[in-house]
Each structure stands twice: as structure tokens, then as C-alpha cells.
């Protein structure tokens, strides 16, 4: 009964169903119709919907974002894809100056229903310019929405929600999630743009998103065995931020640990800590903590990335510290890393 | 859909209309300049006095269904395309009745009833959006042409070339109109582009047809725009037009700024001597198409319209402060 598919298949299915339901939806991006189909997320679309609606594009990120915006203004609903978020930086002018503000600066007379899919790379030597997580940058801009699905269910639901939204939506998918499996209904459905309680608990609230939600889940299971019940909030949507779900959880647990798969300074973790400190200071039983990336570009060598990315054991020990408990080793925690940190799992043999 | 009257001479009525439209733009801009010191128009204004012929000559070729996009110096394009004067002035005055409800100001004019789709001040940034309008019309199987106005500096931005490339690739129905007024703020063309540079060679290298014309001669502008649109209507793809012209007032604001010394006084007076409105007015008079009394009558009519529009703008209410928080999302 419960149909299990991958995160990548969920994205493909959402795209296909959106395109079938609405002839205004089209997908554009470098490599969209190519034989690999953006890691399998666009395979077969060209055969079903033709060249016009499944288009490759010139290597002109900024110009083509403008084109997508213009087409959206006259009634199309474009999905634009970038195989790495880093390339999309070339289109910041169009995204920030035009897409985000078009509705506002013309007094609500026009709308830009544009979805921009960004892939975050990690591991296998992705290095400084192929692995950036820039959710905070986009979330800073009024007028943009930012979603980061962690599960195949939300990969589909949030893609449908993004395409059907009348605003520009930045859809950030983590390359390491593409191969993960989960329950995904066959019919078309939209996930709410808000947070989801992944786990109910009483001792500590962990707020996370995307791939880090999986690490946090792992850590929560370990902590549960140690008698610590974590409430895990998967943000799903970075902007608009679902403050209520976070605050309700803090009311219950009194402890906040933010886990963000991006740089620490001025980031999503800073925003959540600031928000909770302002709005629920009296509920806090201890200082909030966060786990995020050190403020250095991602190195390439796996010998270096092995020490760069935080993992479940870091979450376990930070949580224990917040509860005034001593640190444990991976062995003591029963966490067994099968592979170096530059691959999502042992089946992954590169190149990316 | 625009219909090209191939080979037809421009008739008297059209000449008169274009003269009237240019005069109207000039008088509106001068009225803005006059009122600006009252400190009620609290936003930057980029006046197009001296450049009226390009807007009018191009837009006279467009039908209502055709789209226009523009840049920071957009008043002329907006009015030439049929944008609502009252809504434009109210917008500059920051009023609720403004075309963008006070959220855009002079640099973000819009009038969808005239298919003037918008203007933005980031140099070159409206060009790919205009290409997107043209692409959208193809996807939606609509038969509209898009015209996008920009200055000489916009051709220095990378996205200009990106836009030419895609428009050419998809043979999009768009006409790119470069108004070369020789300055980007105070930076003259010669510090920004090598003397060998030829934009026509550049656009042609992208597979886009193009021509240059006299931006102070509305009949020249009209004729070249007519040719461009005929080319597009034949399905031959985009067209680039470049017109030399000159802005009389300062880059931003109501004043003259020759005292700054960034341009020579005799360069200025030479261009002022080539006033596009005087030029067509004299030729209409010589041909006996228009008389002094008709001109007087036009001036009177326009003056009344402008005065009424300023009254409207000034007496309109300011937006509710709460509206600043509305329309962030659609």
C-alpha cells in the first residue's frame, strides 16, 4: 500500500504532474533534456511534453532568469533548474532585483510565479564552488520564498506547492537526498509551506532542515536510547519561517538546538536563535546552541571534508552538554559510520 | 497586431500626431522640472527632455496589444505607449492613486491597460525580462510584439548579449531600442567603449538584424521602427535599433548640469539646436501641414491636461502606512 520511491523520483513525479495539470508550466535549465536529466529528476519529460516545455538553455543564468520572469509575467509558470546552486549566483540581479520585488514595486499589478530549483552539492571533492548552501542569502530577501525538503514526501509536495505558488520560490534540494527512499503518494498533492514535527519529545527541541534533518533524526534515536527525548522540527520552509511550530516546541522542551547545513555566521541558525530569544526567552532552561559549518569555504580533499561536516555524534554530544551530561564516543553511542564523509552511502562511487 | 503599411508615406495626420505626442512629453517633463523644487515629488526623476523622438517614433508603430518595457528614464516611453498621465504623476508624488500605488515612483512605472509592462532602473535588467515577455507570447501563442528601450550603457552589460543570443536563437518578436545619449550618468561614451566598437556588428554577430538612425528625427525613427516590425512580422526574429540623441537636463533631477564640466557647453548647444520637436515642427510648417494657431491650440490643450493631472496627483491621498506591508507576496 505504502509506495516507496526516491527523493529524485518524487521531484520528477511532481514536475510531471504539474506539467500535465497546467499547460503554463514549463521547465528550463542547463541539461534538463539531456540523457542524465538532472540526476534523474527530469527524465522522460521531453518525450511527454516536447522541446518547448522542456528546454535546455544557453549558458546565461542571469539572462535566462530574466526570460523566465518575463514569461511568468505573461502567464507562464516556469521551473528553472541549476545543477549546482553556485551557478545560480550569476543570476542574483534578476532574482533579487526583479523576481523578488516585481509584485511589490508595481503595486501588486503583476506576479512572478517562478520556481528556481537549486542543487546543493557535497562530498566527492565538490569543493568551494560546488557545495554552497545559501538558504540564508535567499531567505534574507523580501518577496522570495525558500523551501528545503528533507523527505521524498516533501520533495514532491513542496515542488507542487512551489509551482502552484504565485511567487518566486527557491527550491533547494540536497544532492545527497536524491537517493533516499520514502513514502510518496501517487496522486498530486501540495505540502504546506511550514515546519513539520518529525518527532515528538519533551527534553530538547532540535530545529533543522534538508539533509541535516536526517542527521538530527539519527541523533534523536541515539539520544532516546540514552533517555533524552528530542522534539525534532523539520523547517521545510526557511522563508516564510514557521515561527509558531518552533515556539510551541520550545514552550514544551525549554531547550533549543539548531542544526543548519550551512555556515554559522549570519545564517538560518542565527535567525532562529534570535527569534526564539526574543519571543520565548522565559521558556528557555539553558542557552540555545547551534551546530553549523565553520566559516571557511568547503575544502576539496576528503581528508579535509571528513572534519568539515558536522555529524550525528556532534548533535548527540551538544544535546548532552545542554542537559549537563558528559560526552560520549561514537562507539558508546552506537553510531557506526560505514563510509567516509565524502559519500552519502557505500553505493556511491562518484564522480558526483 | 501591428500591421506594416509597406512603402506607404507617413501621412499628415500621423506626422501631426507624433508632433503632438512629443510636445506633450516635453511639456510634462518641463512641468515636472518646474514643480520638482516644491519638494513634493520625493523620488529621483530622470527626465527625457531632448530624447522625445525615439519614444514617439517607435511607439507610433505599435498597437495596444504590443508590449513595452523601459528603464529609469521612462516617462517618455510610458506616455508614448499610452500610459495614464494622472497615474504617472500621482506615482511620482508617492500617492495611493499612483500607477504602482506609491511603491515604485518614477523609476517603476506601469500601465497594463496600455501594455506598458514596467520600467526598472538597474541598467540592462529589464532587457531579458522583455525577452521573456516575447518568449511568453510565443509559448502562449499570442501575436504581440515586445519593444524594450535602454540606454547606451546597457549594451555594456553582459545580460544584453545574453538577451540578444536567446532572442535570436528562438527568433523572438522583439525590437531592442538603444537610445544612445552618449553618457552614463557623467561617464562619457569614450571612457566606456572603444572607438572601434560598433554595436551593429555585435548584434549581427548574434544573428540579430539592426540599424542605426537619427534619434532626433522622429520620421527617421518611425521609418526604421516600421522596418524592424515588418522584419519581425515576417518571422525573421528580433531587431536592434540604435538612435543617437541627447539628454538636455542633468542625469537625475530637474536642472541643467553643464556647470559640472563633464560635457562641453558647445556640445550641449549643438544638440539643443537639433531639438527633435523644433525639427518636426518646422518641417510640418514648411509643408503647410500645421499652422501657428494649431500649435498654440495644442499647447493650450496639453497645458490644461497637465494642470489637471498635477491637481489630481497633488490632491490624491497618500497610501495608508499599512499598505507598505502589503503585496510582498502575491
Image: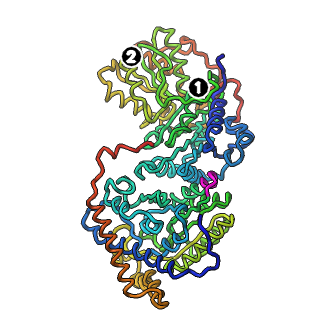
Q: Is residue B136 magenta?
A: yes
Pointer 1 residue: A153
Chain ID at mark 1? A
Q: Which residue corresponds to mark 2?
A: A253
Q: Quadrant of residue B299?
A: bottom left
Q: CA distance from mark 1 to mark 2?
A: 27 Å
Report the quarter where the N terminus of chain B lies: bottom right
- Residue beneath the point at 51% across and 51% down: A94
What chain does mark 2 sit on? A
Callout count: 2
Where residue A8 sits in the image (x, y, percent)?
Answer: 65, 31
Above or below, B321 against B99 in this view is: above
User: Which secondary structure lies at badge 1?
Assistant: helix
Name the residue located 50 percent from the left edge and 52 percent from the top edge.
A93
**Quadrant into which the C terminus of chain B falls:** top left
**What label sits on residue B27 in the rendered view?**
none
Q: With B58 as the anchor, is B321 left or right in this view?
A: left
State the image coordinates of residue A23 (x, y, percent, origin top left): 63, 43
Q: Which residues are magenta?
A: B135-142
Dominant SS of magenta comes to helix
Residue, x 31% and y 56% (percent of image)?
A: B95
Density class for disc 2 (Cα within 10 Å; few <14, some 14-19, many ≥20) is many
Q: Is residue A212 above or below residue B177?
A: above
In the depicted structure, whether residue A265 falls above or below residue B274: above
B2 w.r.t. B103: above or below = below
Amino acid at each position: 500500500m505504502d509506495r516507496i520511491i526516491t527523493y529524485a523520483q518524487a521531484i520528477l513525479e511532481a514536475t510531471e504532474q504539474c506539467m500535465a495539470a497546467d499547460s503554463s508550466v514549463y521547465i528550463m535549465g542547463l541539461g534538463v533534456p539531456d540523457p542524465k536529466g538532472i540526476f534523474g529528476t527530469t527524465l522522460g519529460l521531453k518525450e511527454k511534453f516536447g522541446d518547448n516545455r522542456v528546454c535546455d538553455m544557453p549558458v546565461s543564468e542571469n539572462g535566462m532568469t530574466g526570460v523566465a520572469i518575463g514569461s511568468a509575467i505573461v502567464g507562464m509558470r516556469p521551473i528553472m533548474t541549476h545543477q549546482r546552486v553556485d551557478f545560480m549566483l550569476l543570476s542574483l540581479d534578476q532574482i533579487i532585483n526583479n523576481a523578488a520585488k516585481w509584485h511589490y514595486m508595481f503595486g501588486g499589478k503583476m506576479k512572478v510565479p517562478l520556481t528556481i530549483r537549486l542543487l546543493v552539492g557535497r562530498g566527492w571533492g565538490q569543493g568551494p564552488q560546488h557545495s554552497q548552501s545559501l538558504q540564508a542569502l535567499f531567505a534574507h530577501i523580501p518577496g522570495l520564498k525558500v523551501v528545503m525538503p528533507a523527505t521524498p514526501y516533501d520533495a514532491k509536495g513542496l515542488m507542487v506547492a512551489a509551482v502552484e505558488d504565485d511567487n518566486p520560490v527557491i527550491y533547494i534540494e540536497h544532492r545527497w537526498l536524491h537517493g533516499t527512499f520514502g513514502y510518496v503518494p501517487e496522486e498530486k498533492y501540495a505540502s504546506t509551506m511550514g515546519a513539520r514535527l518529525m518527532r515528538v519529545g519533551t527534553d530538547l527541541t532540535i530545529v533543522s532542515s534538508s539533509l541535516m534533518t536526517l542527521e538530527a533524526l539519527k541523533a534523536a534515536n541515539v539520544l532516546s536510547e540514552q533517555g533524552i527525548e528530542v522534539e525534532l522540527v523539520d523547517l521545510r520552509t526557511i522563508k516564510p519561517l514557521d515561527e509558531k511550530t518552533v515556539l510551541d516546541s520550545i514552550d514544551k522542551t525549554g531547550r533549543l538546538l539548531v542544526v543548519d547545513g550551512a555556515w554559522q555566521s549570519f545564517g538560518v541558525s542565527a535567525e532562529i536563535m534570535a527569534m526564539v530569544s526574543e519571543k520565548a526567552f522565559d521558556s528557555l532552561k539553558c542557552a540555545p546552541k547551534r551546530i553549523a559549518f565553520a566559516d571557511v569555504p568547503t575544502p576539496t580533499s576528503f581528508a579535509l571534508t571528513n572534519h568539515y561536516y558536522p555529524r550525528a555524534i556532534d548533535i548527540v554530544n551538544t544535546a548532552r552538554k545542554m542537559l549537563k551530561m558528559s560526552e560520549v564516543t561514537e562507539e558508546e553511542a552506537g553510531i557506526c559510520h560505514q563510509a567516509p564523509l565524502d559519500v552519502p552511502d557505500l553505493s556511491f562511487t562518484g564522480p558526483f | 497586431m501591428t500591421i506594416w503599411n509597406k512603402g506607404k508615406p507617413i501621412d499628415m495626420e500621423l506626422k501631426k500626431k507624433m508632433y503632438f505626442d512629443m510636445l506633450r512629453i516635453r511639456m510634462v517633463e518641463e512641468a515636472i522640472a518646474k514643480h520638482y523644487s516644491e519638494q513634493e515629488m520625493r523620488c529621483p526623476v530622470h527626465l527625457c527632455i531632448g530624447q522625445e523622438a525615439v519614444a514617439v517614433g517607435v511607439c507610433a508603430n505599435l498597437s495596444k496589444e504590443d508590449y513595452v518595457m523601459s528603464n529609469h528614464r521612462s516617462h517618455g516611453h510610458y506616455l508614448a505607449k499610452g500610459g495614464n498621465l494622472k497615474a504617472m504623476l500621482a506615482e511620482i508624488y508617492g500617492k495611493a492613486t499612483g500607477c504602482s500605488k506609491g511603491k515604485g515612483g518614477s523609476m517603476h512605472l506601469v500601465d497594463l491597460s496600455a501594455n506598458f509592462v514596467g520600467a526598472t532602473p538597474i541598467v540592462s535588467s529589464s532587457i531579458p525580462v522583455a525577452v521573456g515577455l516575447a518568449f511568453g507570447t510565443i509559448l502562449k501563442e499570442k501575436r504581440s510584439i515586445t519593444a524594450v528601450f535602454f540606454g547606451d550603457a546597457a549594451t555594456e552589460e553582459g545580460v544584453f548579449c545574453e538577451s540578444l543570443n536567446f532572442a535570436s536563437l528562438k527568433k523572438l518578436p522583439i525590437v531592442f531600442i538603444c537610445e544612445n545619449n552618449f553618457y552614463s550618468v557623467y561617464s562619457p561614451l569614450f571612457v566606456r567603449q572603444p572607438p572601434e566598437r560598433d554595436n551593429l556588428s555585435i548584434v549581427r554577430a548574434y544573428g540579430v538584424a539592426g540599424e542605426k538612425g537619427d534619434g532626433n528625427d522622429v520620421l527617421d525613427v518611425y521609418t526604421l521602427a516600421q522596418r524592424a516590425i515588418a522584419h519581425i512580422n515576417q518571422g525573421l526574429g528580433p531587431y536592434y535599433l540604435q538612435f543617437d540623441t541627447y539628454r538636455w537636463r542633468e542625469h537625475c533631477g530637474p536642472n541643467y548640469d553643464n556647470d559640472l564640466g563633464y560635457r562641453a557647453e558647445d556640445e550641449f548647444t549643438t544638440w539643443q539646436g537639433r531639438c527633435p520637436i523644433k525639427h518636426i515642427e518646422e518641417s510640418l510648417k514648411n509643408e503647410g501641414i500645421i499652422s501657428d494657431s494649431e500649435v498654440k491650440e495644442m499647447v493650450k490643450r496639453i497645458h490644461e491636461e497637465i494642470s489637471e493631472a498635477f491637481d489630481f496627483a497633488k490632491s490624491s491621498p497618500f497610501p495608508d502606512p499599512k499598505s507598505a506591508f502589503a503585496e510582498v507576496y502575491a
